[in-house]
Amino acid sequence: MKRRHSNKRGISQVMSSVILTATVIVIGTSLLYFTHSVGLVLRRDYFEEVYSEITKLKERFIVEHVNYNVTTGELHVWIYNYGNVTINVNVYVYKNGSTIGNNTSLTEIPANSLVEITVPLQSVESSDLLTIEVMSRRNNIVYEKYIVP
């Protein structure tokens, strides 16, 4: 049998260097774009978290006035937002540690505004001590005590 003579020469060193260099450049560029995109996502998440904390620190509100209407059985709570940001609040009313009423509609209060929130109450008598808790959406809390006349 006669052996066929074929060209069995390998790739030259120059060609192998070019292929290796091209492969390294492609992989390096891919890693660069990947790390850049991950960095952008991390930076955006960090910015949003810091901005949320700054906004939370800018919240300023107080319970300005409280009044109980005996005929309707409703507690009227006036809340003043003296901060620079709009807030959303829920109001909870406690008697002896138990909840007797709430308004969880996340009432919006613009900056530098006074808003009245009405809370229907259950089983309130004269001279009861009520604890009013006003909680913002960002979990800032203001407490107020009120004695029913």
Image: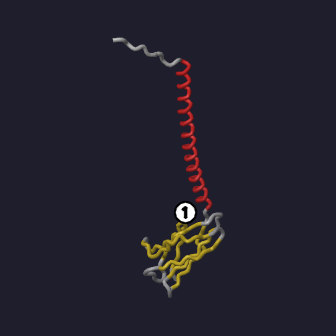
Residue at image coords 50%, 81%: 74
Q: Quadrant of residue 96?
A: bottom left
Vertical order, 10 against 118 (above or below):
above
Residue topped by disc 1:
140
> Which residue is more in the foreground, 8 or 2?
2
Q: Tell me where residue 49 appears, x and y as whole percent.
A: 56, 53
**Residue at 58 percent of width and 77 percent of height:** 116
Question: Compared with residue 58, is residue 38 higher up or lower down, i.e. above or below?
Answer: above
Between 13 and 139, the one nearer to me in the picture: 13
Label 1 sits on what residue type? Asn
Classify residue 138 by image quadrant.
Answer: bottom right
Place of residue 142 in the rendered image (x, y in percent of width and height, measured from the top left): 55, 67
Residue 82's x, y, as percent? 64, 67
127 or 134: which is nearer to us? 134
Q: Position of residue 143 (x, y in %)?
A: 53, 68
Outermost residue, top side: 2
Q: Secondary structure at mark 1?
A: loop
Please name the residue shown 42% across and 72% down the image: 98
